[in-house]
Amino acid sequence: MSRQKVILIAGLGAIGSILYSRLDRTNAKLVCLTSKRGTMDIREKGLVVKLITDETPKIHKVDVHEFLPDKYKFKKCIVATKAYNNQVLADYLVDYMDDDSSILLFQNGINVEQPFAEKEKDWKITRAVSSVGAYRDEKYVTETAIGETKLGVINYSGGDEIKEWKTVLSSIGLEATIPGDFPEDFAYHYWLKAIVNSTINPIGSITKLKNGDIIKDKQLLDLIERIVDELIAILADMITIPRSYALETIHKIARITSGNKCSMLQDLENGVETEIDYLNGKFLEIGKNKEIVSPINSKLVSIIKSLSEKSEPEELAILEFKSLL
């Protein structure tokens, strides 16, 4: 098997599983890296995925590892892990990626590319900002939305790598586009998606509402507007994102993924760490450096962390949230 044609997928959570299933159906050659628990489960049962177009779930036989065999060396890698795993993953991949390998980050969060870009490698890093929706239950992973995916160059010049990733994603039925000719065009979508995720995720996680139900509640709609106002103020000297378009996009994505529990709520229910530090938490860091106060986002970060760490009764966290309404 030529290593030129093998794609490593790091992370088989809900989104990673969807990407695997779509790629596997095109007979792409794939190797997967995931957790010990995930590896054991997949080896025992297979990876079971139901795409939007499926009447019944498909069971995939997966070449999956907790630790990669020494024989492997990859030219292409899709990273679909949680953002807080990126530093450890970047350190680990040094021994398994060629110096000029191509990495596609299919993740939520702000500055998640940093651990990979800091390596003394010529890794060509591309980011995907996507509205693909999925959730995992005890039986299998279900795809719930296949909204558009925007691709952006992080650290290289020339368009060959990003065009190759666009071709890969388009070939598996994901609408992939490369916005504009300059990095700032992708930056617009990058920050817009960060605003969307920093709004829907904490609200959905605390209220336990599905995405579509969030935008049916007048009090929550008012809170969404106030969250967005804080985030736009933090970004004001970096990029201009119209308030009306940010709110429109939040409503659009909530409608597209109306039946979804947000990924952060799924994390809380599964007892795993959330990505709040890479969403609202990153906005707070940026704001602090500019001496911009963001009380609502600060409170949301505090509540999510208390729920994740179980540092206070859930009822108290809910009361804190209600104080924002």
Image (cartoon, grey):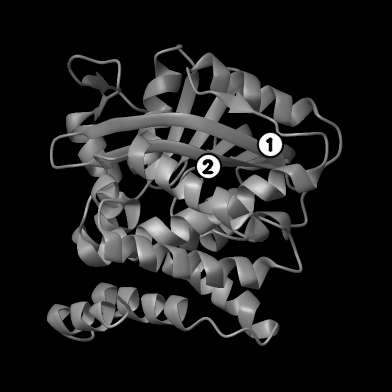
Corner quadrant of residue 314: bottom left
Nearest the camera: 44 or 157? Answer: 157
Q: Position of residue 296 (x, y in %)?
A: 43, 78
Task: Say few, some or many: other residues with alpha carbon within 10 Å of mark 1 (under 14 / 14 to 19 / 20 or more).
Answer: many
Q: Is residue 150 left or right of residue 225?
A: right
Q: Residue furthest right?
A: 157
Does 241 sit above or below residue 34? below
Task: Say few, some or many: other residues with alpha carbon within 10 Å of mark 2 (under 14 / 14 to 19 / 20 or more).
Answer: many
Q: Is residue 68 visible?
A: yes
Does 298 sit above or below residue 55? below
Alpha carbon separation for disc pair 2 and 1: 13 Å
Corner quadrant of residue 161: top right
Nearest the camera: 296 or 300? Answer: 296
Q: Residue at x 63, y 45 (%)?
A: 189
The residue that disc 2 covers is: 106
| Figure quadrant of the C terminus | bottom left
Q: Which of the numbered marks, if any, corresponds to residue 102?
A: 1
SS label for mark 1? strand
Asked whether the residues under the numbered discs 2 and 1 touch, taking CB atoms below 8 Å apart as contact, a structural biologist would say no
Q: Is residue 90 left or right of residue 188?
A: left
Does 60 sit above or below residue 284? above
Q: Position of residue 136 (x, y in %)?
A: 23, 41
Q: Residue at x 26, y 51 (%)?
A: 216
Q: Position of residue 270 (x, y in %)?
A: 21, 58
Disc 1 marks a residue whose amino acid type is Ser
SS label for mark 2? loop
Disc 2 marks a residue whose amino acid type is Phe
